[in-house]
Image (cartoon, grey):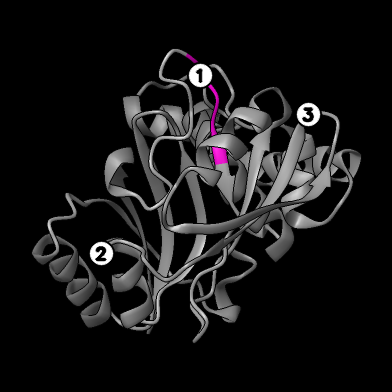
Amino acid sequence: MSVIATVAVPAASFPLGSIVDPDADDTVTVETTVPTSEGIIPYLWVPSSISSSVVDTLESNSSVASVTTVDELDDSVLLKLEWDGRVNGLFEAIRRHETIVISAVGTADRWTLRARFPTSADLSAFYSECLERDVPIELVQLHEAVSPALERRFGLTRPQRDLIVEAYELGYFDVPRTTTLVELGDRLDVSDSAVSQRLRRGLTTLIESTLTLETASVTDPDASESATGTDR
């Protein structure tokens, strides 16, 4: 069974490096990246306010062959990067172990990647190879690879579950937020209003199937009497 893991590396150890101003709270995100024989060509979402400086930084990166603007929204710009083949150990390890990068978020200090590995052995080999290549990688969290039979767990539809997980991974629930409904909609190819409705319905279903059941069991008069032995 495949394994999904969240790993983190310092910005200096990531092929894109630190493209965000250390004094800013901006974040950039990478679209899903599948390793191919031609190499890894990520699509990078950056805030419009820093897009010019990011492009300048990327164009000065000796490993980047070209940077192209693919799309522009009100507050974000989508860039396409092509590499000249001289990438560091992290990308080489990703290619060698057939890793699919589900999402990646970069700040001035570090990059956090959520990736799928064919097996747990591939994850272990990937981790070991990164260390051997002097890439200071950190295993942040292991995730469950959900089978189709469990997609409706907690009453959630697959789109609702995917959206809630994506929002969590990209920092929508953080304070301050590091992503927006518009950005989530762009990643999932739906409108921001649809994202808002889906997120609200999904969270309502999740609360109803977990927290409200727990509250009901605690506040239920019969359960309370049984627990305390009090005769009303």
| Circle 2/circle 1 CB separation < 8 Å | no
Looking at the picture, which amino acid does disc 3 mark? Asp
Give the CA distance from mark 3 to mark 1.
Answer: 15 Å
The overriding secondary structure of the stretch rendered in magenta is loop
First reached walking from the N terminus: tag 3 or tag 1: 1
Q: From this view, report whether residue 5 is shown above or below residue 124.
A: above
Residue ID at (26%, 73%)? 123
Residue 1, disc: none
Helix, strand or loop status at disc 3? loop
First reached walking from the N terminus: tag 2 or tag 1: 1
Q: Position of residue 72 (x, y in %)?
A: 83, 41
> As drawn, is 128 to the left or to the right of 60?
left
Residue 89, disc: 2
Q: Position of residue 231 (x, y in %)?
A: 42, 22
Residue 75, disc: 3
Q: Nearer the viewer, residue 60 or 89?
A: 60
> Which residues are drawn in magenta?
24-28
